[in-house]
Amino acid sequence: MEIDAKKLWDFVQNKTQQSRILVVGDVMLDKYYYGEVTRISPEAPVPVTHVTSTKETLGGAANVAHNLALLGCQTGIAGFVGDDYHCQSLLDKFTSRGIDYRGIIYTDAPTTTKLRVVGGHQQMLRMDFEETAPIGEPYAARYLNYIEQRLNEGLDALIISDYAKGACTQETCCRIIDDCHLHHVPVIIDPKGSAWEKYMETDYITPNLRELNAVLPEPIRNKDEAVEKAASYAMRKYHIRNMLATRSECGVSLVQPEGTEHIPTKSQEVFDVSGAGDTVIAVFTLGIAGGLTAFEAAYLANLAASVVVAKLGTYAVSRQELVEALENQQKKGLEI
């Protein structure tokens, strides 16, 4: 299928700021401790990391919003946090990136935080600070009321980012999908787990191969025909309208009722896949919201992911990086 390079370039450079997208789901903070490993601890057979720098970044649904904001989109976020230091770090980052966080709901649970220790280029340890119980009242009602308010104000698309941390329950997901369809707003979901009943009737879903295998009678290999058949099975079973399956080194597959397009990866080097799925759903949704075809949006999302996996740690692609990636592909003739 042909790609109009000028159209994509013009979209990324000039039109992304017109789109209004709300990201809802599991908000989290990613913390990194970087250092060097030169010895084994005398206390236990574990490597000692001499920490030389630290970093905090937006994670989960917040990283999806970060990707959208860096690309110039009018971005909002809704989810749950605790009243703690990690929450304040999140809010500071939302503010500095121009993300509307009126939908952030304070609860009595801690802010979900992932702490990673990295020695050289190797992740040595990950620690998760979280409570994953399904969100209850009165928090769920405030969350749903805010989303309804934003739909009434006007949205071009809504993303549900499910990391199985409690925000994306059967009740909240079904209500959000129904409300979006009443307002003619497309819903794009990044799934988690095997309970896809809560995603029924969504417009698009963006599983990776592991997430797709979770809902199949038996797992498949990462081959075009197998992915296409598996996607069609899941779409029929859960009444999902379209699927963009992300397939690591094999790129992405866009499966729709009218046909399937397999788009190979554009990455030359893979350093770290952290956050690549967040980038895919953000850029794909931005394309859908901005009037690109699903194929054009998928191509752009796949290209953006190739930038992200070449970086270390959770990373959000910028407009300039995506423009440069498009220009590089244009020089090569935009091969599909």
Image (tube, rainbow, N blue to C red):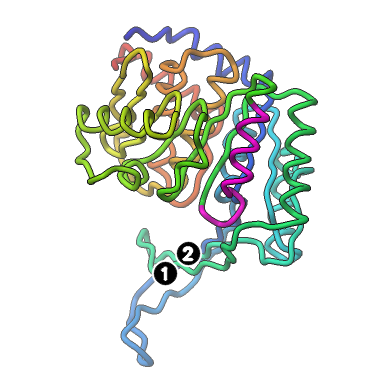
Give residue 261's quadrant in the image.
Answer: top left
Helix, strand or loop: magenta stretch: helix
The amino acid type of the residue labelled 2 equals Arg
- Element at label 2: strand
Residue 116, numbered label:
2
Q: Is residue 252 visible?
A: yes
Q: Nearer the viewer, residue 329 or 19?
A: 19
> In the rendering, at what x and y percent does residue 273 appear?
39, 46
The amino acid type of the residue labelled 1 equals Leu
Taking the image as shown, residue 336 lies to the left or right of residue 120, namely left
Q: Nearer the viewer, residue 85 or 104?
A: 104
The reply to whether callout 1 and callout 2 are in contact (CB within 8 Å) is: yes
**Residue at (71%, 51%) from the top-left corner?**
140
Is residue 336 located in the magenta-colored stretch of the structure? no
Taking the image as shown, residue 250 lies to the left or right of residue 304, namely left
Indicate which disc, 1 or 2, sits on the residue closer to the N terminus.
Answer: 2
As measured in the structure, the alpha-carbon distance from the residue carrying label 1 to the one carrying label 2 is 6 Å
Q: What's drawn in magenta, residue-wise?
A: 164-180
> In the rendering, at what x and y percent does residue 226 appear?
21, 32
Task: Give the position of the C terminus as an image quadrant.
Answer: top left
Q: Quick check: 37 above or below 214? A: below
> In the rendering, at what x and y percent does residue 330 appear?
38, 14
**Residue at (59%, 52%) from the top-left corner?**
57
Q: Quick check: 332 above or below 101? A: above
Q: Quick check: 84 above or below 268? A: below
Mark 1 residue crowding within 10 angstroms, few (<14) / some (14–19) / many (20+)? few
